[in-house]
Amino acid sequence: MTTTFHSLGELRHSSPTLLLSFGLFLLPLLSSAADPGVGTTKGLLDTPRPKDAVELVGKTGHILVAESKFKNQWTFKDGVLTASPKWDSLVTPESYQDFRMHVEFNVNEVPNADPEANGNSGVYIQQRYELQILNSHGVSAEDYKASYAGSLYKQKKPDKLVSKPAGEWQTYDIVFRAARFDGDKKTENARITVRQNGELIHDDYALTNKTGAGKKEGSQPLPIKLQGHENQVRFRNIWIQRLKLD
């Protein structure tokens, strides 16, 4: 026999056995609602730097390598890695699937430049998806484009505009879950959560495709790139931790 309750009041006055059964039925649902669960990038930025993090840029050096065979013109001094004035980039020596990453950066200022030629760099996740770095402080919400700082390049603007002026150090804290594939077919979009300067600007956003000049989406993990874009943006204290977000 199936018992139907038309109100919570009726449920409260039912037998203890029925109440227990109903509670056991609800428990998995409640746990699921409270737990970020499988396939999400939520809830992973609220802890200190993990012990298993790999230091990419530290106080005494860095481990990034040239993306291409062309001469690399990035420089390192006193714990700060400065981007090339040309069009060459650096990448991690290893490839990454799911990860957590911390980046500190400081944009340059180019007077009278086109807005997208002013302090331009970017964090290219898997060389596919660009989290834009740009000198965008003071741009109004009405004029803000999805190619300005904090944007997932030309795909999504940040939820908050929190960029600091050129010359001040800023932070990106990133959790990324790679797209999932069954053979050549994508079964799940890549997902990303980002905090800029401590403020949430992307909340478990599902990336619909690669961005801009990024490499084609695929099942294989790829390195992470710091883009050289003819601006001498500075970087320091960059680390990454591998995750398994299945």
Image (cartoon, rainbow, N blue to C red):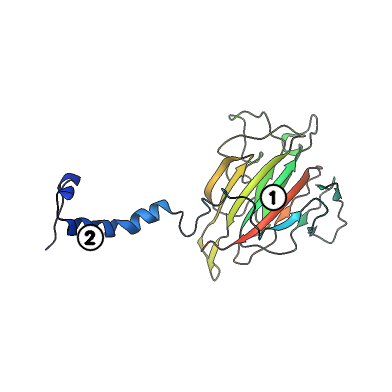
For the N terminus, the quadrant is: bottom left
- Label 1 or label 2, whichever comes before in sequence order: 2
Of marks 1 and 2, the one in the foreground: 2
Of 150 and 245, the residue lying toward us:
245
Q: Callout 2 environment at 10 Å: few (<14), some (14 to 19), or many (20+)?
A: few
Name the residue beneath numbered marker 1. 123
Please state which amino acid type lies under the numbered disc 2: Ser
Residue 51 falls in image quadrant? bottom right
Q: Position of residue 103 (x, y in %)?
A: 70, 48
Name the secondary structure under disc 1. strand
Q: Position of residue 64 (x, y in %)?
A: 78, 58
Alpha-carbon span between mark 1 and mark 2: 50 Å
Of 74 and 114, the residue lying toward us:
74
| Camera sees residue 214 | no
| Camera sees residue 144 | yes
Of 12 and 81, the residue lying toward us:
12
Residue shown at the point (59%, 53%) measured from the top left = 175
Q: Is the residue 206 above or below the residue 217 in the image?
A: above
Name the residue beneath numbered marker 2. 21
Q: Is the residue 69 above or below the residue 115 in the image?
A: below
Which residue of the protein is positioned furthest toward the left in this rendering?
A: 1
Please state which amino acid type lies under the numbered disc 1: Val
Q: Is residue 25 left or right of residue 76?
A: left
Name the secondary structure under disc 2. helix
The answer to the question of whether label 1 and label 2 lie on touching residues, with beta carbons closer than 8 A, is: no
Q: Position of residue 21 (x, y in %)?
A: 23, 60
